[in-house]
Image: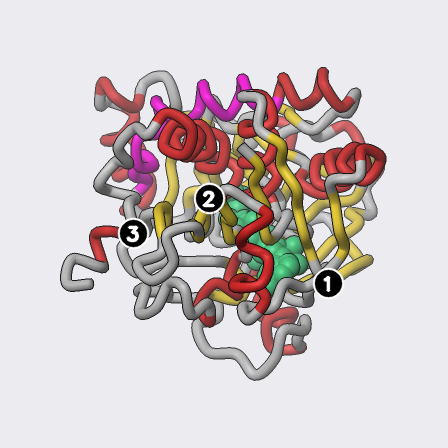
Amino acid sequence: MKILLIGQGVAGTLLAWTLRKRGLQVHIADGNLPGGSSLVAAGIINPVTGKRFVKSWRFDDFFPSARAAYLSLEQALNIKIWSEQSVVRLLATPEEVNDWSARCALPDYTTHLSESEDGGEWAALVRPGFHFGIIRRAARVDFPTLIFAFRQQLVSEGFFQQKSCEYGEVEKIKGEYDAMVFCEGYRGQDNPFFPNLPWQIAKGEALLIRIQDPRASSIGQMLKKTMTLVPVGGQVFWAGGSYQWHYPDLLPGESEKTFILEHLTGMLAAPFEIVGHVAGIRPTVKDRRPFIGQSPVEPKVFIFNGLGTKGALLAPYWAEHMASYLIDGKLLDKEVDIGRFYQNF
Ligand SMILES: Cc1cc2nc3c(=O)[nH]c(=O)nc-3n(C[C@H](O)[C@H](O)[C@H](O)COP(=O)(O)OP(=O)(O)OC[C@H]3O[C@@H](n4cnc5c(N)ncnc54)[C@H](O)[C@@H]3O)c2cc1C
């Protein structure tokens, strides 16, 4: 089978790699278009999220698949992209402390959560007055290193084109491929082959900060309250992200910078400086489930998208699932099949 993937964020990368492992000839076109989200994301995998500390959807299915895939990619591409890091969770109110304790006691949470006497590696750098929880089995994937290393390999083998694919071209080029899969991130909302999908697109911004305390350079844990701080090397940390459902443009803006800074100042006692500011658009979906499946209007055209806020965790598992669907004709899981929105087509 010869397949064209349109878009090489983390979705296109994991799908291409999985299909190639299964022996398919995979071509990718990516236009390096503005607003993409993988290249600005922290790549955090966090088992327990939200204000109520609820375990992520099917985390115990997805995490082993993610770990295996990223470790294999490390070997295949000779890169370092996977690090398992615990998260120090700052707990500010008695309600949060109570909710945390209650979760820690639940059997399904004992491998992930515990209470902590102190702020772990962050103890000297956070403001006084917090209680602390620890989240285990969290991890981080370095998306940019993965995407560029994989792209380099595709370029050297002649399978990558830097180009934006226009929807009008599909009719002309579809004879050259057995299937075309759109992995366009948030741009999928305008794709006429997949009309009326319930997108709920969210712009996100993050700062890169340098903590001006030499002890910051030895921190290997993440720190989370409303914002998450992720060590990215030296005394530099990725700090974000914000959520905006209405936004004037794709660029980093002052209002989100101020919002993130306010939160960071509430978390950190140590002084810091801003060394970077990024923005991207998340391919988020109303029912928070990926968009996978066949176009209702063009049978050769497919979608692999809607990874939302959790591309790092979801991409590997659903790429395997998509591969079994395309190659072996296995049925798609109804939770992710876009057929759930096209029953009347
Ligand atoms: C601030 C922020 C923080 C985040 N943090 C995390 C995190 O910690 N952990 C996590 O798991 N997720 C995080 N996310 C979400 C994560 O970024 C997404 O889940 C994931 O990256 C989506 O990947 P994607 O490949 O679907 O889309 P994208 O990364 O947007 O990639 C789409 C690609 O398609 C290309 N493209 C689009 N249309 C065309 C076309 N017509 N022709 C050619 N090329 C095209 C674009 O150039 C782009 O390269 C974050 C997002 C943001 C914005």
Q: Which residue was labeled with disc 1?
A: 277
Mark 1: few/some/many CA within 10 Å (<14, 14-19, 20+): many
- List x then y, in percent, for residue 164: 68, 64
Residue 123 appearing in the image: no
Indicate which disc residue 286 carries: none
Q: On the rendered image, what quadrant is the C terminus found in?
A: bottom left
Query: In what element is the residue under mark 2?
Result: loop
Going by the numbered disc 1, the residue's amino acid type is His
Query: Which of 13/314 is in front?
Result: 13
Q: Earlier in the sequence, mark 2 or mark 3?
A: 2
Q: Which residue was labeled with disc 3?
A: 338
Which residue is outermost to the front?
175
Quarter of the figure with residue 102: top left
Count all numbered tags in the image, as a single digit. Answer: 3
On whether residue 268 falls in the magenta region, the answer is no
Mark 2: few/some/many CA within 10 Å (<14, 14-19, 20+): many
Q: In the drawing, does residue 283 fall left or right of residue 230?
A: left
Say which residue appears at 76% left-offset and 55% top-offset. 162
Query: In what element is the residue under mark 1?
Result: strand
Query: Which of 310/242 is in front?
Result: 310
- List x then y, in percent, for residue 50: 36, 47
Q: In the rendered image of this protein, does residue 296 appear above or below residue 56?
A: below
Say which residue appears at 39% left-offset and 30% top-offset. 321
Q: In the drawing, does residue 8 fall left or right of residue 310?
A: right
User: What segment carries the magenta color?
Assistant: 53-70
Going by the numbered disc 2, the residue's amino acid type is Lys
Q: In the rendered image of this protein, does residue 205 appear above or below residue 117?
A: below
Inter-mark Cα distance, 3 to 1: 35 Å
Going by the numbered disc 3, the residue's amino acid type is Ile
Q: Which residue was labeled with disc 2?
A: 310
On whether residue 65 falls in the magenta region, the answer is yes
